[in-house]
Amino acid sequence: MFAVHLLAFHFTKLKEDQIKKVDRYLYHMRLSDDVLLDVMARFRAEMAKGLGRDTNSTATVKMLPSFVRSLPDGSEKGDFLAVDLGGSQFRALEVKVFNDGKQSSQLESKFYPTPKEVIQGSGTELFNYVADCLLDFMESKNLQHKKLPLGFTFSFPCKQTKLEEGALLAWTKHFKVRGVQGTDVVSSLRKALQKHKDIDVDVLAMVNDTVGTMMTCGYDDPHCEVGLIIGTGTNACYMEEMRHIDLVEGDEGRMCINTEWGAFGDDGALDDLRTEFDRELDLGSLNPGKQLFEKMISSLYLGELVRLILLKMTKEGLLFNGKVSTALLTKDKIEMKHVCAMEKYKEGLSNTKEILTELNLFPSEEDCIAVQHVCTIVSFRSANLCAAALAAILTRLRENKKVLRLRTTVGIDGGLYKTHPQYPKRLHKVVRRLVPNCDVRFLLSQSGSSKGAAMVTAVAYRLAAQRKQIDAVLAPFLLSLDTLREVKNKMRAELEYGLKRETQASATVKMLPTYVCGTPDGTESGKFLALDLGGTNFRVLLVKIRSGRRRSVQMYNKIFAIPLEIMQGTGEELFDHIVQCIADFLEYMGIKGARLPLGFTFSFPCRQASIDKGTLVGWTKGFKATDCEGEDVVDMLREAIRRRNEFDLDIVAVVNDTVGTMMTCGYEDPNCEIGLIAGTGSNVCYMEDMKNIEIVEGNEGKMCINTEWGGFGDNGCIDNIRTKYDKQVDEGSLNAGKQRYEKMTSGMYLGEIVRQILIDLTKQGLLFRGQISESLRKRGIFETKFLSQIESDRLALLQVRRILQQLGLDSTCEDSIIVKEVCGAVSRRAAQLCGAGLAAIVEKKRENRGVEHLQITVGVDGTLYKLHPHFSRVLQETVRELAPQCDVTFMLSEDGSGKGAALITAVCFCTGCFSPGHSAILY
Ligand code: ADP
Ligand code: MG
């Protein structure tokens, strides 16, 4: 018993001594966490340098754009070929991808040797060899008569300019083929393939093995956004935000970046960590001075590092009694597989002993322990360095996403990671220690690097098909200039119908006389009340107007909510509510007893017989109170005031918001003769010559016409440009069949059109993984303000995603791009249609005046116009295009509908009326 104990003690002691000896000898290779954090920081800086336009040329880590922008989403399908060049063996594959909801795929492949004369010969020989192998593979699978898309895994640093185009920057690993560097490898492969008349393959994509690995893992795990190779070479790729990639046009979405991290340190950045062994190994390699990081990590060099260490230790008498064997002097005699075998601790020292014996080294027990430990230090350093660089990538990803914790998956391939007994465990542990705020899943990819090229091709195929479908959905929203001109002409015709006595009754653009016959001249003064009803807010205002030198307008206002049940209740309830709000306001302003003149902005179509009479033609927008249509709204207001019996008011004018807007701008600019609203609704008014207004007597002067152009198209005249989505929005509205133009152009409906398109795209499987969420089903959830937010140029895609998230729409990056595109198509069409309508108006004004060139100002109000990032610009461009003889100035009205009503009231109150003598109305 005692003897055994002693022996065990003796062995432990012996082991400790050996380990201490090696530890001391290789202390420079044992990297503490502090050092690793430092490496991580250095690598982060290198990445940033590689991404920057001005710094890229001197960066060692090239950060090459791969032109892979999308990960698989599981809906890929088809039959694809792939060839994989750059690993230890050349391989040809056929990959079948099934869209069966289970992410299944089938892979058949054949390996071919890569003889030295091929990988160190000429370019033509190399690509001919690849083509020959592929032909052999296709023959063996009976595929030679099929036309198949092919993906090319080419695992060397390439400067890609497209998914299917890339010039080799430099050979790495054990490749050194003449005449390839700087040329496009895809076209070389194509050329070689064309020599074989009996096969027809189409090279659609070239990828690096790292990208291939990420794509293959991404097919199984949607969180995968990093690809890592630890094999013959080492490299990593990850999904970077486009806006950080200076070298590729565009800011939208993400693109996979092939870091080519193997070259990290080539500028000396790692010299303090490199040992004499690293230097010696580098000098003896095919590419001295290059790929210095790779040479500390990848399997191609691990064995050689171990050999160099053992050689030196032996020479110094620390091993094998100082006896060097010929084998130990032979380059590359120790390979990765030996290192892996020696580190199988479970098998004790037997593997080590056997391997060393084969090298004629006659190892003692102590020697075996020491050598095993050398292997461990060398391979552990590899895992440590790899972990540090990977940690830098993960941190970048986390910061790009602006999250505190990152959940992500790293797809891994490569012989060292796969076969070394301890490597994965060590790598995972160190990564988790270096980036504790990242939850990382490491997913080993099966044939990832080779299969990946087929996956990339499959994704490219899917995207091309999807693009076609999306384009088809959005095509009807793209209006040509000719179509817009046609819209303008139709609008013009409808304007005329509305003005003519015979056609007036049936006209869809009603052209309502407003009895406003001029603009304020600055002599108005006094205190007035105004009401603004007709949009999102109901407001009561007190307006103080001063004339003369101290000419000014002061306003006080209060917004009141109109609950839905009142908007859609009875007319009496609605007007009682309005009067209640007036009472609150008077009290709030402390003018309860005052009897003030009041202007009523009522932004719905009204037939007026005078400035203070207005019969509601029909509700629009969200209103639907009963017993109002056909009634005089001024009377209804008066009656409600009487019912309350608390105060009295002089209702002087009822005004449309377009008119108020025109008046407000006209107060500043006498050339303003048009008022435009692009808010909840869409409408225009303008000053028309009395002689053209057949339904109002008199031919002198002008009168403002409230066009009510929102009803344009209600006779079907623009049905040729209405899409099925417009029809769906119409059918779901309160006034189906009515206000068709308004429903294509105004704030109340644009979001809803977008929602209908999104539903359709989702049904077609083009969005949200084909899942129509509860929230997407909700009418009105997609408000027009979200269009403004999403389309804002300053917004990164991530923020678009966040907005969609808030709406309960769980979107991927690609989804967000599509949603943004949809919003853009809908708002652009709205602005163009509005512009076409306005072009008809200004052209009419030009002809009225009988001038070659017209200078005119349009007063504009409405949140859509004011806050949407592109609406106003597109509208103006369209007007310029369609009415080139008109020079139109757009003037934003400050609070036009409220202030305008007060101004009109002031004019009427001060002068009696605009122009007596227009009172007879001839309907
Ligand atoms: P009104 O209801 O009097 O037309 P607005 O001119 O303020 O009032 O328009 C309100 C409408 O503008 C809302 O119904 C909504 O559709 C739209 N809207 C609100 N916010 C935005 C925004 N940020 N961008 C574009 N449209 C908006
Ligand atoms: Mg308004």
Image (cartoon, rainbow, N blue to C red):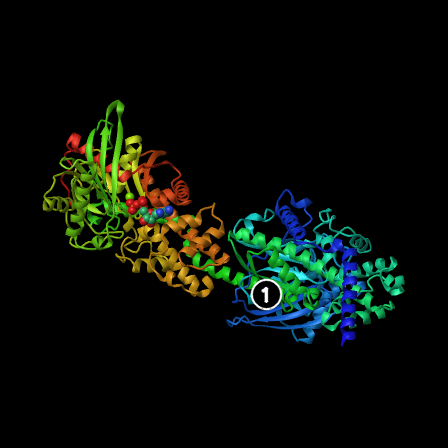
Quadrant of the picture in which ligand 2 is shown: top left
Location of residue 764 (image quadrant): bottom left
Where is residue 551 shown, x and y percent of the image? 26, 26
Instruction: Say how many tags the image has.
Output: 1
The one nearer the camera, 111 or 692, is 111
Badge 1 marks a residue whose secondary structure is: helix
Seen from this angle, which residue lies furthest front? 2
Compared with residue 583, is residue 237 higher up or lower down, i.e. above or below? below
Q: Is residue 746 visible?
A: no
The one nearer the camera, 866 or 424, is 424
For disc 1, the marked residue is 217
- For image coordinates 77% across by 50% down, the residue present is 289
Compared with residue 467, is residue 861 higher up or lower down, i.e. above or below? above
Tag 1: amino acid: Cys
Q: Is residue 768 visible?
A: yes
The N terminus: image quadrant? bottom right
- For image coordinates 26% across by 48% down, the residue present is 509
> Badge 1: how crowded within 10 Å, few (<14), some, or many (20+)?
many
- For image coordinates 31% across by 43% down, the residue present is 677
Please state if 825 lies on the left or on the right of 206 as rendered.
Answer: left
